[in-house]
Image (cartoon, rainbow, N blue to C red):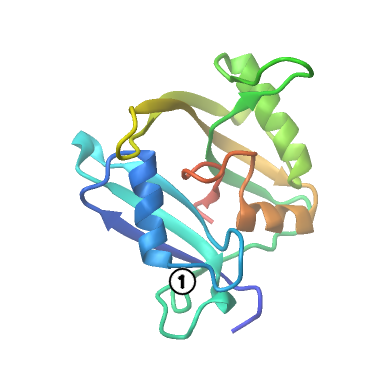
Amino acid sequence: MPNNTLAELKFLASNVNDAYGAHQAAWKVVGASPTSGRHFHHDYNILPSNRGCLITVRAEARNFDKDHPLYNAPTIQTTYEKGTTLHFLLTSAAIIKEPRKPQRPCVTRHDHLGWILMHSARNGFCINSDSLEIDNEPALIAKPGRPKFSLNKARFEGCLTVTDTDLFAKSLTSGVGRHKGLGFGMLKIINN
């Protein structure tokens, strides 16, 4: 197995219907870090009628023992040549951060377009703006013993072109954007 093989494991969590529950379910499957810090990345999709969710977890397979599900999970391609055009999907907690002002969620298409263009440049790809579809929905956060609240969940889908092979591979491994702990930021390549 190559040292940098990125494993991707998908599973159903039947009793989970919020971002925090998906986060906890991912930790239960993956387990504690073999070193320290973040050792996996995940996202989630709530199933119709809130009947659970589909969770996708990504991690470098080499970080796990041979009997761990991620060690033997299917791998995804992370290396693409500069100039390659791909169909993508990305969900994020897109925010605007301006000097000397509190951060605020992106709400308008203009805000979202600015966010994705800035982050794509930092992560080794550019966006075909004409192909870009943007949706917003609240992401429920239900931590036990605390009031429920929602984050603004932005969903970007369209075509991208790889501009930097190494940065793009890192974005597929580590995610895009600042907020990644509750299932945001996973860059997915569709129909490749």
Apparent side of residue 48 relative to residue 87 in the rendered image (left or right): left
Residue picked out by circle 1: 74
> Where 141 sits versus 81, above or below?
above
Question: Does the image show residue 138?
Answer: no
**How many residues crowd mark 1 within 10 Å: few (<14), some (14–19), many (20+)?**
some
Apparent side of residue 14 relative to residue 155 in the rendered image (left or right): left
- Please tell me in which quadrant of the rendered image residue 93 appears: top right
Q: Position of residue 142 (x, y in %)?
A: 33, 35
Q: Residue at x 64, y 62 (%)?
A: 78
> Where 42 sits versus 73, above or below?
above
Question: Does the image show residue 59?
Answer: yes
Q: Quadrant of the N terminus?
A: bottom right
Q: Quadrant of the C terminus?
A: bottom right
Q: Residue at x 64, y 15 (%)?
A: 110
Q: Position of residue 133 (x, y in %)?
A: 53, 27
Total tally of numbered discs in the picture: 1
> Where 47 sits versus 72, above or below?
above
| In the image, farthest residue toward the front | 145
Q: Position of residue 92 (x, y in %)?
A: 54, 35
Q: Position of residue 33 (x, y in %)?
A: 53, 68
Judging depth in this view, the residue of 143 and 16 nearest the camera is 143
- Amino acid type shown at disc 1: Pro
Judging depth in this view, the residue of 177 and 39 nearest the camera is 39
Judging depth in this view, the residue of 130 and 119 nearest the camera is 119
Q: Residue at x 75, y 59 (%)?
A: 81
